[in-house]
Image (cartoon, rainbow, N blue to C red):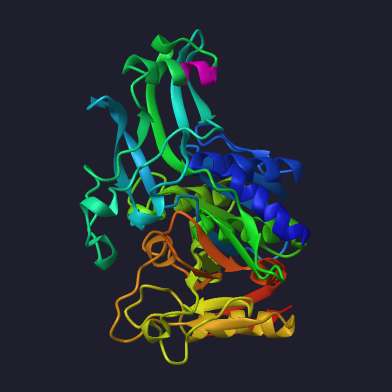
């Protein structure tokens, strides 16, 4: 259960994308990785390094002498929630409410009638300039109340929540005023209210990660999508013995809103990082293009597990279940990157290591979602395969997955990073 408990600690600490990257940094630094700021010159050789962008995306790389190519995992740091607007405080009807808007495609009803809090980053004016400070108010701070059934008798027949009306959390029932909001933030950070310049703050479900079930079969938590994949790929990356190539661990922000930001999967972040590694190692452009052609990406984003009450929503054959291994995801419309070539490579690695795996595809009459692999491939194109840990209630404020699948995913990613994958045109030799 050690890996499961460690994941739970990671989930409880990674309350926003900024905190998730901060937790990744702690693991990387403990594992001997050196930080390379994007705006400074990189002096690198064989060794372990990482860089970050916007404090919400991160790329780490482990350079071994051998064949010049990249084996990359990519996951995302963000999860659906609600973000505060710049002027968030609304005084109305004796209450103090916070003005929020939806971030990503969350299941609104799962956010009501439970303790919430705030977390994110605050830009602070100091004697040395503007600094970014992480904030997580670790207390039951907010609540979004439902309307009583007596005033909405049809609510259990289906209700369309309005984000501007129904989803505004209560901060005070009358004791506080608008100015008290910045006073609260300032007190939490140990600064003066006038030193607050800007904020990126999000609602956070206060319910901690938990092992569920009489036989400890399930793990439930907020943000399983996609922090489960961030954690298992990070741990597989740092624990892999790399002797032959360049391993890359990437975490992008803003997947839930399209990946089109400076720190998203469609940004220049991955391309510029790999290009700078190429330059720092004294390689030519020709060598870089050849390396990319020999490289492979695993896009790690959680998958839908067969729902116990609605099996009719799933494909008749490609329907992963909990605790039976990772899911290899495919889509004919290329929402996922998996094809026969990349699937064959991953299957060979998993089967050589006796690591269980499953397959996922949507019903042919149900449109599925997209992820970051196909988007990052528009910027840096290479062979790629999509995987995920099967889970229930994706995009709920509190999601559920299989406890055993955490270990299976770690083993799969570690095996991938340790494998010697020699791609030559349409042929590939895989040594595990």
Is 167 contained in the magenta span? no
Q: Give the range drawn in magenta.
A: 185-189
Instruction: Classify the position of the C terminus by image quarter.
Output: bottom right
Q: Is residue 191 above or below residue 413?
A: above
Q: Nearer the viewer, residue 152 or 217?
A: 152
Left or right of 92? Residue 32 is right
Q: Can residue 63 be seen in this view?
A: no
Q: Is residue 285 visible?
A: yes
Left or right of 214? Residue 267 is left
Residue positioned most to the top: 127
Does the magenta stretch mainly form a helix, a strand or a loop?
Answer: helix
**Residue 104: x %, y % from top left:** 34, 53
Q: Residue at x 35, y 40 (%)?
A: 83
Q: Is residue 173 above or below residue 11?
A: above
Residue positioned most to the front: 150
Q: Residue at x 72, y 64 (%)?
A: 66
Location of residue 356 by image quarter: bottom right
> Tag count in the figure?
0
Instruction: Classify the position of the N terminus by image quarter.
Output: bottom right
**Residue 382: x %, y % from top left:** 47, 69
Q: Nearer the viewer, residue 8 or 97?
A: 97
Left or right of 154? Residue 207 is right
**Residue 239: x %, y % from top left:** 75, 58
Q: Nearer the viewer, residue 425 or 335?
A: 335
Q: Is residue 19 above or below residue 64?
A: above
**Residue 58: x %, y % from top left:** 54, 46
Location of residue 241 by image quarter: bottom right
């Amino acid at each position: 259960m050690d890996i499961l408990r460690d994941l739970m600690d990671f989930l409880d600490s990674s309350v926003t994308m900024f905190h998730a990257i901060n937790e990744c940094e702690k693991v990387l630094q403990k594992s001997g990785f050196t930080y390379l700021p994007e705006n400074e010159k990189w002096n690198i050789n064989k060794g372990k390094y990482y860089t970050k962008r916007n404090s919400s995306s991160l790329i780490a790389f482990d350079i071994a002498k051998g064949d010049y190519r990249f084996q990359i995992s990519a996951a995302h740091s963000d999860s659906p929630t609600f973000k505060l607007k710049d002027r968030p405080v609304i005084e109305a009807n004796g209450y103090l409410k916070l003005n929020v808007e939806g971030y990503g495609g969350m299941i609104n009803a799962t956010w009501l009638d439970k303790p919430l809090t705030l977390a994110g980053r605050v830009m602070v004016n100091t004697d040395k300039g503007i600094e970014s400070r992480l904030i997580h108010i670790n207390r039951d701070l907010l609540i979004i109340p439902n309307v009583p059934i007596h005033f909405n008798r049809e609510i259990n027949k289906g209700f369309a929540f309005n984000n501007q009306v129904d989803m505004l959390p209560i901060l005070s029932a009358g004791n506080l005023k608008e100015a008290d909001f910045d006073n609260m933030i300032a007190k939490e950070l140990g600064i003066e209210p006038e030193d607050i310049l800007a904020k990126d703050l999000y609602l956070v479900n206060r319910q901690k990660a938990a092992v569920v079930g009489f036989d400890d079969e399930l793990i439930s938590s907020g943000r399983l999508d996609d922090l489960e994949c961030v954690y298992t790929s990070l741990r597989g990356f740092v624990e892999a013995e790399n002797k032959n190539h360049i391993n890359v661990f990437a975490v992008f922000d803003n997947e839930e809103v399209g990946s089109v930001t400076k720190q998203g999967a469609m940004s220049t972040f991955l391309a510029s990082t790999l290009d700078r590694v190429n330059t720092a190692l004294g390689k030519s452009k020709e060598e870089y293009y050849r390396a990319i052609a020999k490289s492979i990406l695993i896009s790690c984003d959680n998958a839908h597990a067969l729902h116990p009450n609605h099996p009719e929503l799933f494909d008749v054959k490609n329907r992963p279940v909990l605790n039976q291994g990772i899911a290899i995801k495919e889509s004919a419309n290329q929402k996922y990157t998996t094809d026969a070539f990349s699937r064959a490579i991953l299957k060979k690695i998993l089967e050589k290591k006796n690591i269980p795996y499953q397959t996922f595809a949507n019903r042919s009459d149900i449109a599925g979602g997209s992820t970051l692999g196909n988007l990052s491939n528009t910027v840096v194109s290479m062979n790629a395969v999509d995987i995920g840990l099967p889970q229930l209630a994706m995009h709920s404020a509190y999601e559920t997955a299989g406890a055993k699948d955490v270990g299976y995913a770690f083993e799969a990613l570690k095996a991938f990073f340790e494998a010697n994958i020699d791609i030559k045109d349409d042929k590939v030799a895989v040594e595990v």
